[in-house]
Amino acid sequence: MKSNLIGFVQGRLTKSPNNSLQYFPKKWDEEFKNANKLKVNFIELFSERKFNSKNPIWSKKGVESYKKNLKKNSLRPYAFTDNYIISNNLKLTKTKKYLNRLIKQINSLNIKFLILPMYGKSILTDKNYVSFIKSLKILTKNKKVKFLIESNISISTFKKIEKEVNNNNLFFLYDVGNRALLGKDPEIDILQLGKKRLKHVHIKDKNTKGMNVKLGTGIAKFNKVFKAINKINYSGAFAFETTRQNNPIQTMRYNIKFLKNGLNV
């Protein structure tokens, strides 16, 4: 296998209430310890849709605790997902202020990528993308972090956005499960993106109802994903955003093996 970084979205090693997908673990430091045992490279940290002052990212003490636990468990500060924009439109002044504050906080952790999941109130489509150009252009002028768009838009639309924003600081996050649910051909998508635009991949599988399922049991065409990834000589990271099942740690061991085997084919 290549030297791609492997990690998982925060909360995926912890059972969540009501099986909710995005869950900030109360004992987040325990997850760091387990991540170290699994020998992954990073945890993709995140902020919730509703502002949570108890999230360590928002305080000096919390950030220092993150730093301590990252170092102690040999984990890299790599990527951060801002779920707040799902419930608050990216174009709103309050959202822009929020993001500016967040960038300062993640800068103090030396995090490389800020992920913008453009769904919900900030949904980005092939029809409305022009309305987001100005906000994305202003936001991505901040070169202290690189920005990743996670969206259901076509690759051709992303290329249009990239051209309009025009500051070499906006890249694409490819979510295998989400794109499969849209009926997209991952090989075509990934080859169109190429190594230059594709900087992060969320690994997950879904069934036809849109539910997260065990890797390799849903509709995602992983054989095509791995073929295209190898073809473009992808150098970015992989983050598991998978179902936890009954035993999250055991599931993650399966996930890591599944990914490594797939990439080595």
Image (spheres, rainbow, N blue to C red):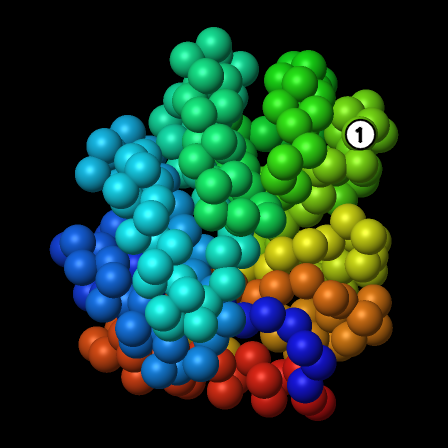
Q: Nearer the viewer, residue 32 or 84?
A: 32
Q: Which one is nearer the viewer's eye here, 167 or 258? A: 167
Residue 181 rendering spot, x and y as whole percentages: 53, 55
> Badge 1: few (under 14), some or many (20 or more) residues near its Cα, within 10 Å?
some
Secondary structure category for the residue under label 1: loop
Q: Quadrant of the N terminus?
A: bottom right
Q: Which residue is mark 1?
A: 167
Q: With 148 as the anchor, is 25 left or right in this view?
A: left
With respect to residue 25, does 214 lie above or below?
below
Q: Amino acid at mark 1?
A: Asn
Q: Position of residue 264 (x, y in %)?
A: 68, 88
Q: Is residue 264 above or below residue 240?
A: below
Q: Quadrant of the C terminus?
A: bottom right
* Total numbered badges shown on the rendered structure: 1
Q: Is residue 105 visible?
A: yes
Tell me, yes or no, if residue 128 can be seen here.
no
Residue in the picture at 37% in, 27% down: 87
The residue sitting at 73% across, 54% down in the picture is: 198
Residue drawn at (48%, 31%) of the image: 104
Residue farthest along the top direction in this orientation:
93
Residue 73 at what x, y percent from top left?
37, 72
Q: Where residue 260 sits in the image (x, y, percent)?
A: 58, 84
Q: Is residue 124 left or right of residue 87?
A: right
Residue situated in front as seen by the camera: 171 or 190: 171
Q: Residue at x 61, y 64 (%)?
A: 237
The answer to whether 87 appears left or right of 75 in the picture is: left
